[in-house]
Amino acid sequence: MSIDRREFIAAASAVTGASLLPGAAHAQTAKPKPLNILILGGTGLTGPHQVRYALSRGHKITLFNRGRRPKEWPAKVEELTGDREVNDYKSLVGRKFDVCIDNPTSVPHWIRDAAAVLKGNVNHFVFISTLSVYAKTDKPGDETAERAKYEGKDAMAEKITDLRKNMALYGPLKALSEDESHKQFPGMTTVIRPGLIVGPGDETDRFTYWPVRVRKGGKVLTPPHADPVQLIDSRDLAEWTIRMVENRTLGDFNAIGPDRVLTMGEVLKVCKEVSKSNAEFVETTLKFVEDNKIAPWGDFPLWVPGSGETAGFHRTSFAKSVKAGLTYRPLNSTVADTYTWWDALSEERRSKPRAGLKAEREAELLALMKG
């Protein structure tokens, strides 16, 4: 089965989340020295969690984006506007910050152009990258693993509109954006590489499909239960990013988890326990998946085969990040909060899941399994 990792995580970052409180696994630390933090973006899945957590820690926050406004913040937040795709940074000229967190960049010219305004005006630059930068997924790897190579003519000429037309460029361009971050902000850069970001606010449904489908009950077609899966709650990612800023921790880090081996079967079990559903899991085999052209990551969200070309996909090392303070809330908390968020969405939105098997297709496959 030929599988390209870049297709799996390219759209993992999505829309605004909700909660700000740390999970039970998070140790409360004394409030640090207040920092003046600039967040580029701040309106996606993790950005609002960064803002709320940073405010709770006593930091001053400035957002820079195209002017989209999430719900009101719990404290004062300065909001500046500009369009990075057309190099519009006028509102940042002459401003100084302790740290800049760059959430949305996917093309390297955004780093270069921002640096023209920010260089010398920030003491710490944090670039939110992706595990999609890694070239291979057949073996487990750490932060030193080979990254994807860009094979185009001029990476600095690539635009967001170009990337949206060819998502195969996502990993290579993110890798070049990492390089540009280190180049423009030498000795003061932190690169954080999240994997699949989940929890309330994840509009991709690449995790949400399973809690929702399991709660519906009945016979549920599932991938092999023994295969490992990795994910990170958007709130854990956001809060750890702020703590990395507080400690001025530099270097490259994989942001994935949890802090143990998690299997697809355990995810399903937790969904069933939290929802108290009557779901009956019908476990497939890899051969059945291949024979019936069930798409890993798409038809079966979250899951990819734990062998072959993707044997290392869900076995990425995150030991360096745990040592740097990354912590994880319990999976049942993520599932429960995902239900709360999902149930608050409109009926129209909930009727159109963006990942996973359609009901008719699942019924067909269940019939084949029975036969």
Image (spheres, rainbow, N blue to C red):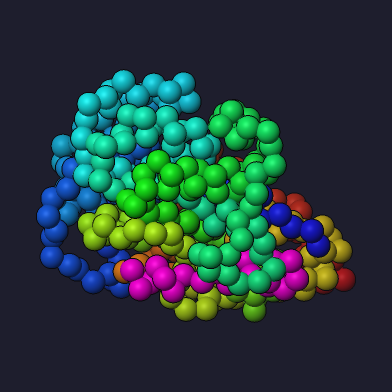
Spot occupied by residue 5 in the image (x, y as percentages of width and height): 66, 56
Q: Is residue 147 left or right of residue 88?
A: right
Quadrant for the C terminus, please.
bottom right
Left or right for 267, reference 148: left
Q: Position of residue 324 (x, y in %)?
A: 33, 68
Left or right: 119, with 159 as reference point? left
Q: Main secondary structure of the magenta part?
A: loop
State the image quarter where residue 29 is shown.
bottom left
Residue range (magenta): 304-324
Q: Count the labels in the image.
A: 0
Q: Is residue 162 left or right of residue 41?
A: right
Q: Quadrant of residue 243?
A: bottom left
In depth, the one of 268 and 194 nearer the eye is 194
Provide residue 182's location: percent of width, then percent of height: 42, 48
- Does residue 167 lie above or below 229 as drawn? above
Instruction: Give above or below for 219 relative to 58.
Output: below
Can residue 35 be spotted in the picture?
yes
* Rendered position, 259 above or below 31: below
* Residue 283: image location, x then y, percent: 71, 74
What residue sits 42% from the left and 54% below the top?
191
For residue 114, above or below residue 137: above
Q: Is residue 263 magenta?
A: no
